């Protein structure tokens, strides 16, 4: 069947000797996809699957059964199916319809007789079709004939080629048919990983498919030139998420140098007897001794403006395909650009398929209206709100005029030529490629428009981050958001992403199917929304209906799902950060009773200024628990030095000591810690200081901490840049090699830490003590970097590696977290006109006052006043 008419997703039942006549029964299923092309066209505002497609499904199952019985081999190497048993009447009874909200179609076929005659082999069957366990079709005298063929398989509309696995082995020796086998392994052929149409599952590009046909033709002819490839059509995606065996089968046409080919992929089935070659693409290839001809030049660009960089995520391609250089332009009727051959990491093959794919990067796939609508303005194409996105569907023709270029650059021109269908769903365009001023190729291609859906309506960077990198993107979800932690999802929204099978499971980290998958996605997205999108939904676990999130170890999560019927559900989730484990660890390590002043003070500031603790790799963090580590972090606001130490100690199961500047020893941080030490009756020593003007003090302190790490098992935390930032966009750009040497010498894993949400995007005129607007930050702990990963690296590379690990934890958005207006108002009223440094004690006091206990009974007014005014001297 042609791609748009492929009506069987999988065969779920096979009984070759079953049925009343003992000639076999087969069952196949197709999952209903609300995004299918026919629902958009049949009928307007009343989508129904055409009845003829139900019969098509039954015929395809019958074809499978005939091949399963070996009738393809029996008919011979050039055998083909007639589209139906011509001259034989059938009876079809119809009692229902298939609509987008249905889940699954099931077809069952029972062969009642097989007739061998001069015209071929006829199989006649009784058949029925079911939708969601309700039978809606019956068909009697359903017939299909395999005819021997004459070497001309006919057009796709007239006949379907028999898969090679059904042809007798002797076919390989027939001179008019040749086969080229290819093995693809993403572990070896890493370039294919950079071609993921939905950012998560690699597949073979259409241009690479065309190149395989060209390679097979060159091999078959002993080196002839491929001058034209036509009618390249994909039956299904060639997914390359694991090693795959492919083969191109070429059949010589009557005209010299012309071939009809098919690309097949070997499918390993759970039962060996069902493993088979499956057709994935068709094409025609024309070869000649020499190139010839010259294409007509393209029309001038109309209203051309600069074309934005497509590699920000607008196209899904990775670096291996990123060949388009700066300077591309787009107009009302097309685009132009230049491709750099040395940027292409795709094998050259016969046709430079990576470069041909790069030519498609001047096509505005997500904003085709700039070409298809007369009212569109090219200058605003990047902001177009097209509801659809185009994907390559059909290479109508590709003509080649010269040898494939292997060095230098290639100029590409694209021009819109209209639609290949009457519904306006298949925009068509021409591509002209030239090298060194000489024409190389002209390609005409049709795309098929698919609904973008919620996850593709956003910009390219957001799509790539959420789908490809599985990073949290604020406000982005497949479900419809009704309120914080309340989201609704239905089959129609799911279908906008599920046209590429397996995408939903890959993006959301699930093995579920159907309604169970819908419920799981809605639940995960509700939890992610409840925690301010601090995590990606895939980090939420749903096991036997129980919801958890190891990435958020301090969150207490609740979730429930309501079935709304008609393929929809609503999920509600809540989450509360529970600081009790951190407070308990701190109290136990200090050897103090519950409710002592240090526990209350740190607990109050934690609850006020930390929103979520995120552990990106819980298993890796658990593996180093109790082992001394080096925590390297960015630095937004001063309170991080205090709270990062507290949280880091609990998380690592070690006493974390933070290195700070000497000026902070007599500042508010030092004074508060001395007050806590006084309450504990001993020096807890979680902060150590050195004078920045005396570098030898830093080296001496590092040596001291190395000794304590070896003898007492302490960990160390350092703000890598050595100073606070003044805007959220700043990243770590400095890191002393002394710290890296310490980690390697002491075999300390390095734990990257990123403090997020505490600064505005615009630079401030001064540094902050607490988060901007009294917001609560997220503390994001990365995967521990083990010493063995770093040994042998040059210092520059090692430093960059660690800094990238810290900066890579930064959230997608640099926007500050929402301000706490109530606290801000109280602090302003208590300390009008005070600087951030002067008002910090009012911040701490306000946080303590929010506790459900009277903390003032634990300290005297005199002590508190002394610490506020900085008169509590170092001991």
Image: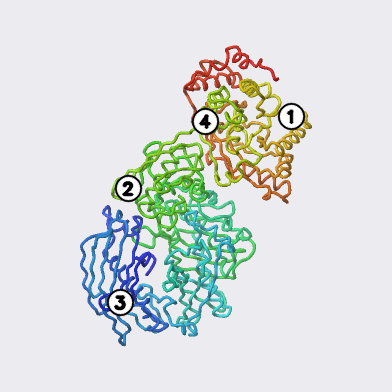
Task: Evaluate if marks 1 and 3 touch, with contact meaning CB atoms under 8 Å apart.
Answer: no
Figure quadrant of the N terminus: bottom left
Return the disc, 4 or 3, that comes first in the chain's sequence.
3
Depth order, front residue of 4/523: 523
Residue 85 position, x and y percent, is 28, 78
Q: Residue at the location (32% across, 47% down)?
A: 568
Q: Which mark is residue 875?
A: none
Does 395 sit left or right of 39 as displayed? right
Return the disc, 3 or 2, that comes first in the chain's sequence.
3
Q: Which residue is mark 4?
A: 776
Task: Say what secondary structure mark 1 lies in.
Answer: loop
Q: How many marks?
A: 4
Task: Say what secondary structure mark 3 lies in.
Answer: strand
Residue 753 position, x and y percent, is 60, 39
Task: Evaluate if marks 1 and 2 touch, with contact meaning CB atoms under 8 Å apart.
Answer: no
Mark 1, Cα crowd under 10 Å, few <14 / some 14-19 / many 20+, is some
Q: Which mark is residue 692?
A: 1
Q: Which residue is mark 3?
A: 144
Does 531 sit left or right of 624 as displayed? left
Q: Is residue 614 above or below residue 395?
A: above
Label 1 or label 3, whichever lies nearer to me, is 1
Q: CA distance from mark 1 to mark 3?
A: 87 Å
Return the disc, 1 or 4, that comes first in the chain's sequence.
1
Q: Is residue 179 above or below residue 134?
A: below
Q: CA distance from mark 2 to mark 4?
A: 35 Å
Task: Say what secondary structure mark 4 lies in.
Answer: loop
Q: CA distance from mark 3 to mark 2?
A: 40 Å
Question: Which residue extends farthest right?
Answer: 696
Depth order, front residue of 751/363: 751
Picture quadrant where residue 135 is located? bottom left
Q: Which residue is mark 2?
A: 568
């Amino acid at each position: 069947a042609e791609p748009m008419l492929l009506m069987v997703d999988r065969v779920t039942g096979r009984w070759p000797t079953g049925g009343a006549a003992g000639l076999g029964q087969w069952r196949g299923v197709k999952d209903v996809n609300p995004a299918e092309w026919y629902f958009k066209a049949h009928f307007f505002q009343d989508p129904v699957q055409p009845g003829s497609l139900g019969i098509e499904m039954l015929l395809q199952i019958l074809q499978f059964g005939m091949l399963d019985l070996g009738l393809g081999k029996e008919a011979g190497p050039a055998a083909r199916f007639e589209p139906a048993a011509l001259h034989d009447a059938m009876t079809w009874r119809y009692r229902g319809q298939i609509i987008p909200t249905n889940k699954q179609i099931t077809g069952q076929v029972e062969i009642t007789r097989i007739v061998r005659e001069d015209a071929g082999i006829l199989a006649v069957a009784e058949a029925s079709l079911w939708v969601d366990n309700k039978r809606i079709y019956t068909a009697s005298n359903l017939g299909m004939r395999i005819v021997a063929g004459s070497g001309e398989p006919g057009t796709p509309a007239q006949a379907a080629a028999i898969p090679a696995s059904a042809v007798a082995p002797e076919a390989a020796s027939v001179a008019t048919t040749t086969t080229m086998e290819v093995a693809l392994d993403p572990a070896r052929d890493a370039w294919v990983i950079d071609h993921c149409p939905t950012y998560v599952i690699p597949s073979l590009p259409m241009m690479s498919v065309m190149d395989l046909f060209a390679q097979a033709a060159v091999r078959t002819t002993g080196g002839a030139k491929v001058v034209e490839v036509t009618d390249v059509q994909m039956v299904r995606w060639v997914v390359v998420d694991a090693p795959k065996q492919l083969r191109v089968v070429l059949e010589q046409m009557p005209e010299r140098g012309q071939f009809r080919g098919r690309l097949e992929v070997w499918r390993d089935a759970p039962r060996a007897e069902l493993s088979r070659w499956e057709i994935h693409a068709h094409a025609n290839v024309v070869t000649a001794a020499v190139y010839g001809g010259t294409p007509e030049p393209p029309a001038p660009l109309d209203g051309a403006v600069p074309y934005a960089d497509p590699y920000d995520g607008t196209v899904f391609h990775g670096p291996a395909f990123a060949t388009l250089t700066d300077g591309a332009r787009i107009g009302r009727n097309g685009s132009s650009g230049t491709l750099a051959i040395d940027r292409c990491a795709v094998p050259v093959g016969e046709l430079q398929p990576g470069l041909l794919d790069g030519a498609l990067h001047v096509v505005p796939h997500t904003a085709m209206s700039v070409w298809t609508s007369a009212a569109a303005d090219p200058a605003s194409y990047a902001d177009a709100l097209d509801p659809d996105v185009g994907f390559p569907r059909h290479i109508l023709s590709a003509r080649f005029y010269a040898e494939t270029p292997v060095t230098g650059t290639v100029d590409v021109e694209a021009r819109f030529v209209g639609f290949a269908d009457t519904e306006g769903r298949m925009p068509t365009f021409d591509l002209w490629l030239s090298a060194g001023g000489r024409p190389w190729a002209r390609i005409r291609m049709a795309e098929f428009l698919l609904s973008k859906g919620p996850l593709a309506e956003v910009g390219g960077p957001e799509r790539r981050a959420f789908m490809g990198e599985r990073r949290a993107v604020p406000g982005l979800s497949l479900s419809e958001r009704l309120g914080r932690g309340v989201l609704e999802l239905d089959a129609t929204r799911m279908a906008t992403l599920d046209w590429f099978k397996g995408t939903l499971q890959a993006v959301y980290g699930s093995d579920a199917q159907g309604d169970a998958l819908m419920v799981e996605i809605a639940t995960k997205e509700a939890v992610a929304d409840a925690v301010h999108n601090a995590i990606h939904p895939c980090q939420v676990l749903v096991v036997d209906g129980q919801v958890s999130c190891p990435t958020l170890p301090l969150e207490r999560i609740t979730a429930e799902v309501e079935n709304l019927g008609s393929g929809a559900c609503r999920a509600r989730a809540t989450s509360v950060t529970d600081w009790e484990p951190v407070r308990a660890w701190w109290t136990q390590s200090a050897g103090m009773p519950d409710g002592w002043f240090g526990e209350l003070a740190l607990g109050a500031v934690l609850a006020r200024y930390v929103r979520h603790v995120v552990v990106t790799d819980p298993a890796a963090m658990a593996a180093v628990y109790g082992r001394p580590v080096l925590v390297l972090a960015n630095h937004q606001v001063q309170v991080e030095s205090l709270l990062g130490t507290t949280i880091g100690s609990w998380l690592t199961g070690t006493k974390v000591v933070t290195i700070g500047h000497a000026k902070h020893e007599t500042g508010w941080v030092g004074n508060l810690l001395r007050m806590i030490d006084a309450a504990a009756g001993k020096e807890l020593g979680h902060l150590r200081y050195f004078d920045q003007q005396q570098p030898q003090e830093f080296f001496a302190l590092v040596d001291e901490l190395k000794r304590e790490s070896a003898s007492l098992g302490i960990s160390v935390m350092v703000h890598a840049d050595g100073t606070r930032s003044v805007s959220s966009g700043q990243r770590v750009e400095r890191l002393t090699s002394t710290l890296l040497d310490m980690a390697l010498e002491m075999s300390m894993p390095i734990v990257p830490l990123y403090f997020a949400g505490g600064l505005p995007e615009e630079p401030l005129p001064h540094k902050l003590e607490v988060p901007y607007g009294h917001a609560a930050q997220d503390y994001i702990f990365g995967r521990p970097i083990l010493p063995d990963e770093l040994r042998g690296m040059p210092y520059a590379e090692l430093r960059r590696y660690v800094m990238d690990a810290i900066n890579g934890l930064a959230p997608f958005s640099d926007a500050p977290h929402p301000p706490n207006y109530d606290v801000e108002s109280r602090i302003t009223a208590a300390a009008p006109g005070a600087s951030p440094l002067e008002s910090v004690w009012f911040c701490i006091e306000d946080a303590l006052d929010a506790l459900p206990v009277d903390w003032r009974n634990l300290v005297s007014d005199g002590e508190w006043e002394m610490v506020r005014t900085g008169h509590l001297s170092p001991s």
